[in-house]
Structure formats: C-alpha cells, structure tokens
Image (cartoon, rainbow, N blue to C red):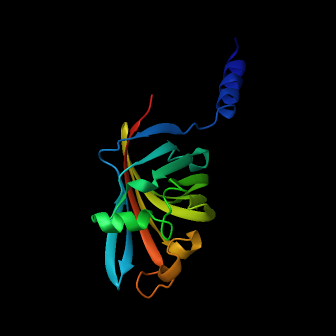
Amino acid sequence: MSRFWIVLAMIGGCLGTSAVAAGWIVDPARSAIGFTATFENAPAAGVFRRFDASVQFAPDHPADSRIDVVIAIPSADMSSAEINDAIRGPDWFDATRFPVAEFHSTQVRSAGGDRYLAVGTLAVKGRTKPVEVPFRWKADGDLATMDGELTLDRGAFGIGLGEWRSSKVVGASVVVRFSLHLRKGG
C-alpha cells in the first residue's frame, strides 16, 4: 500500500471518530446531596440519603456528555423526626405523590478550567423547570469528583404551601450542594 493511501486512511479514521464520554459510577457511601434553607433567617440544613446518578462525561468534549440524577424525596433528612415528617407532607415535598426529583441534562459545556455547566431540566413535585447546574470536575485516573451548588426558588416548585408560602419564616431560596465521588465504569 502506498504512503498516500496509508495517510488518507489515517485521516479518514480520525475524522470518522467522535469523542465518547466515559461512563462514571457513583460511590454512594462517599457522595452527598444536601440543601440549606433558612428558617427565621438562620440556616436550616438537610441531606438526601438516597439518590443515584448516571454520569457520561468527557472533560475535553463536554458536548458529548450527559448527566442524569434521581433523588428519593422520602430520604430527605433535616436531623429531626418532626421536621422530616413535615417536609415529606403535601405542603412541602408531598413525597407520597412525588417520590422522586429528577435532573436531566440537555447540554454540558465548559466554563473554563475544571468548571462546567450542565444545562437541563429539574422536576420536583410535579413541576419541571429549566436549570443550569455549575460544577467542578477533578479526575485522577479512574477516579473523579464532581462538586457544585445551585440556588433554587422553592416557590417555583410548589414547595411551601398554605401558611408556608410566604418567605417571612422560611426563606424563598434554597441552596443545593452536591459532591459526587465517581469511578470510571467498565
């Protein structure tokens, strides 16, 4: 085979391939999704004890990436049985009717350096809204961490009804923080 055909075959092979985002598996024991609201102007923190994420991520080609997260709403824990029962009720998360919250990315793009932005939809309590989720990606071989936070308006998702609709006692904004520890899937 002549050198011309070898070079042409190599160029064609390079043009015919696209980056494939690696699959990453969440280590639930080391990962966390938490939230902080305000109650009478003081921070009120909680966590979701059960969640799962499907992460297909290529840092050098974020457009080929996809991130999906499913959170078990009944697993919300604010370190008080009384508060936990209340937030699972119809005025707050309505966990019986809406047992999961879901984020699905439609686009992932670089924000410079090790920072990225996952654009997609968040569905909570039967309401789906567009959101942008900034995150930081750090990888070391087959291990990685994905950390970030976003601020949500609880009223946009119908969280806090009746006497709790007002933001005088419970603030309107909720900060959601996440730290996912991942290993490259096979």
- Looking at the image, residue 103 sits to the left or right of residue 78; the answer is right
- Considering every residue shown, the one lying at the far top of the view is 1
Q: Residue 111: x and y, percent? A: 52, 62
Camera-nearest residue between 141 and 92: 92
Question: Which residue: 72% across, 19% down?
Answer: 5
Question: Which residue: 46% across, 65% down?
Answer: 89
Q: Quadrant of the N terminus?
A: top right
Camera-nearest residue between 30 and 90: 90
So how many labels did they put on this image? 0
Q: Residue 26: x and y, percent? A: 40, 42
Question: Which residue: 49% across, 62% down?
Answer: 134
Image height of 139 relative to 111, above or below: above
- Considering every residue shown, the one lying at the far bottom of the view is 168
- Looking at the image, residue 170 sits to the left or right of residue 78; the answer is right
Q: Residue 91: x and y, percent? A: 50, 71
Q: Is residue 113 in view from this perspective?
A: no
Q: Residue 107: x and y, percent? A: 62, 54
Q: Is residue 146 in view from this perspective?
A: yes
Q: Quadrant of the C terminus?
A: top left
- Considering every residue shown, the one lying at the far left of the view is 79
Q: Quadrant of residue 185?
A: top left
Question: Which residue: 49% across, 44% down?
Answer: 55
Image height of 58 relative to 88, above or below: above
Q: Quadrant of residue 126?
A: bottom right
- Looking at the image, residue 21 sits to the left or right of residue 25; the answer is right
Image height of 167 relative to 107, above or below: below
Q: Quadrant of residue 47?
A: bottom left
Image height of 139 relative to 157, above or below: above
Camera-nearest residue between 67 and 112: 67
